[in-house]
Image: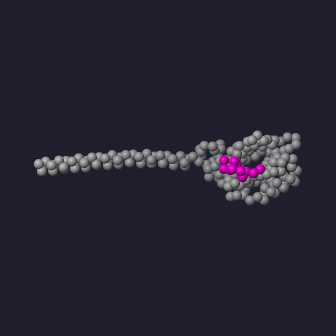
Amino acid sequence: MGRKERRDRENKRESYASRQSTVKRKNMLIAIGVFSIIAVIVGYSVYVFLNMTETAPGGPENAGALGSAHDHAGVLVNIFGDSFDFSAPSYQIKSSWIHFEARDAFTIHKHATGVTLGYLFDTLQLTLDDQCFIFKDGRQFCTNDDYVLQFYINGEQVSDIREYEIADDDRILIAYGSETPEEIDAMLLELESKELLK
């Protein structure tokens, strides 16, 4: 009986070792499969992230990749002599391409080529054309017989600013009212004296 018991024990050990080896091999194959799937997902995510700068949702048409520019310009919107405040949270960082930030009401930050002022105002839900400045609550400031909507870029009057792409250190004035040339000059001086947040 001793030999038979020994043989049975050896067979059980071999069977147990064989089962353990099979279980380890199976677990190893599962782990390799899981890690392979994770590697594919991470690789695809990195690929998408690196390429999304040109195709990220919500970006302006014809804009370059995020980071293709880093320009700052100052803007002053003056309606009936009062400066509009872009420091409210509802006007801060509404787009990665161009925005106001750090609760600053004056400095426009542009982070890609091909991004226009029209796109900035669209992201802020402000309607702007060559005749009207319209707030999202419906208030309209349109050129009429008594009041004029005027645009200035770096001290020069222009008819429209929607298609303008800012360059570093530009100064933009949007004025609505019945200002005299002297009052416009004073606004331009104020605009020039403000420091940009960089």
With 44 as the anchor, is 69 left or right in this view? right
The structure's colour scheme is one colour
Residue 164 as seen in the image, left or right of residue 45: right
The residue at 11%/48% (across/down) is: 1
Q: Nearer the viewer, residue 155 or 180?
A: 180
Q: Quadrant of residue 148?
A: top right
Asked whether the viewer can see residue 113, the reply is: no
Residue drawn at the location 87% of the way across and 54% of the way down: 182
The C terminus - image quarter: bottom right
Range of the magenta residues?
A: 84-94
Q: Is residue 160 visible?
A: yes
Residue 150 forms part of the magenta stretch: no
Main SS of the magenta segment?
Answer: loop
State the image quarter where residue 190 is shown: bottom right
The location of residue 64, given as percent across then percent down, is 63, 48
Q: Residue furthest front?
A: 1
* Residue 172 at x, y percent in the picture: 76, 51
